[in-house]
Image: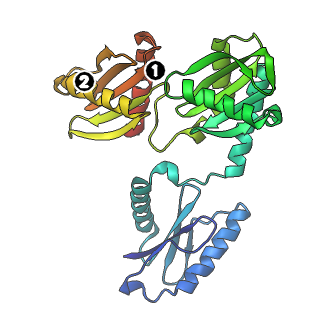
């Protein structure tokens, strides 16, 4: 047997410490001293894989960039390493692999702002901003020069007319304080689910080019916006079902109406895929506000709801990409 200690990557207070009677001879102060040495060495870009004393081996195993496991025992190194790897896998299963990495908020904000300014330059607009989860996240300097009522109006227009209904919009507007006589052009597009970028711009470029440029400008920060369970691009909702175990694996709904629609689609139409042994089975149907699509393979069924503005060719393209990526993730 061996003892296990889990600490933060900066050598902070242990998160847990497993101690058995056989290892009582190892003082905790010994581990603390060694842990301090490891932490200092890491700052100097020196990495210790193991430290040995006359009686014990001390093995360190990093989990992401935020946690460190330490195994202390009188077993051989490979046995302790195997045990730490198993514990590491268990921790990842419990808290999620994406939650074990440090995310520096200030650095993320700077990266998002750099992407915003790049998009601003590409579409020739000095007045651009980003909305994340219905809140302003970043904006160019000209945004802050607007009257506060005009800023509120612009965000309200996007939330009321675009957020849960479409993926892009091109809206002619007047601003009550900044532009009462000159008609302005408000353009906005969804980067990923719940993340929108918007701008006041001239007659060019067209909306298609604006969407393409937004996707290119923000591609380096897209992963910051993704939740623990991925929301597939352009969708208003989805469910993933393990048809072998007859249980739901993941779900996302932008509204209760989407939830009702996609569940009804699954129960009445898509569930028949559970009895279909063919690989890559597909089924789709159209609704009033949304089109629904399902694909099934290897015991996994993915059902998605897309705004009705998207035709079935576009839906199938994005859905199949998302489905293949999901299968790759769970099989990796």
The reply, left or right, for residue 273 in relation to residue 168 is: left
Instruction: Confirm or deny contact between disc 1 and disc 2 (CB under 8 A).
Output: no
Bin the neighbour count of mark 2 within 10 Å (Cα to Cα): few under 14, some 14-19, many 20 and up. many
Q: CA distance from mark 1 to mark 2?
A: 18 Å
Query: Which label sits on residue 270?
Result: 2
Name the residue rendered at 59%, 80% in the picture.
Answer: 32
Q: Residue 227: x, y in percent?
A: 50, 42
- Quadrant housing the N terminus: bottom left
For discs 1 and 2, the disc positioned in front in the rendered view? 2
Quarter of the image for residue 11 reads bottom right
Q: Earlier in the sequence, mark 1 or mark 2?
A: 2
Q: Residue 29: x, y in percent?
A: 57, 85
Q: Is residue 162 visible?
A: no
Q: Which residue is mark 1?
A: 318
Name the residue rendered at 49%, 23% in the picture.
Answer: 165
Mark 2 secondary-structure assignment: helix
Name the residue rendered at 82%, 32% in the picture.
Answer: 142
Looking at the image, residue 124 lies above or below residue 113:
above
Looking at the image, residue 49 lies above or below residue 257:
below
Residue in the foreground of this view, choosing between 115 and 85 = 115
Looking at the image, residue 305 lies above or below residue 21:
above
Q: Residue 276: x, y in percent?
A: 18, 22
- Quadrant housing the C terminus: top left
Residue found farthest to the bottom: 25
Q: Residue 212: x, y in percent?
A: 64, 18
Query: Which label sits on residue 138?
Result: none
Name the residue rendered at 65%, 16% in the picture.
Answer: 171
Quarter of the image for residue 124 reads top right
Quarter of the image for residue 297 reads top left
Mark 1 secondary-structure assignment: helix
The reply, left or right, for residue 151 in relation to residue 18 is: right
Bin the neighbour count of mark 1 within 10 Å (Cα to Cα): few under 14, some 14-19, many 20 and up. some
């Amino acid at each position: 047997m061996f003892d296990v200690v889990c600490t933060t990557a900066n050598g902070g207070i242990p998160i847990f410490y497993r101690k058995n009677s056989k290892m009582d001879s190892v003082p905790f102060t010994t581990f603390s001293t060694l842990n301090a040495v490891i932490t200092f060495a890491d700052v100097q870009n020196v990495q210790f894989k193991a430290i040995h004393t006359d009686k014990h081996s001390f093995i360190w195993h990093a989990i992401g960039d935020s946690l460190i496991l330490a195994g202390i025992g009188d077993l051989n190194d490979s046995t302790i390493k195997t045990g730490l790897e198993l514990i590491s896998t268990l921790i990842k299963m419990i808290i999620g692999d994406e939650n074990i990495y440090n995310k520096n908020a200030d650095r993320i904000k700077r990266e998002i702002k750099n992407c915003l300014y790049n998009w601003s330059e590409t579409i020739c607009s000095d007045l651009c901003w980003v909305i994340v989860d219905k809140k302003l996240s970043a904006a160019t300097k000209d945004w802050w020069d607007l009257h506060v009522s005009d800023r509120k109006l612009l965000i309200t227009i996007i939330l009321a007319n675009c957020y849960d209904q479409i993926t892009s919009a091109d809206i002619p507007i007047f601003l009550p304080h900044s532009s009462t006589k000159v008609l302005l052009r408000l353009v906005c597009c969804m980067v990923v689910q719940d993340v929108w970028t918007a701008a006041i711009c001239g007659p060019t470029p067209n909306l298609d080019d604006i969407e393409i440029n937004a996707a290119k400008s923000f591609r380096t920060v897209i992963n910051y916006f993704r939740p623990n369970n991925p929301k597939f691009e352009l969708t208003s909702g989805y469910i993933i079902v393990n048809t072998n175990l007859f249980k739901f694996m993941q779900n996302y709904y932008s509204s209760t109406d989407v939830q009702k629609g996609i569940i009804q689609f699954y129960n009445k139409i898509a569930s028949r895929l559970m009895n279909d042994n063919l690989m890559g089975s597909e089924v789709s149907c159209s609704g009033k506000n949304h089109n629904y699509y399902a694909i099934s393979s290897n015991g996994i069924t993915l059902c998605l709801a897309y705004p009705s503005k998207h035709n079935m060719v576009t839906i199938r393209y994005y859905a199949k990409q998302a489905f293949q990526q999901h299968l790759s993730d769970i099989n990796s």
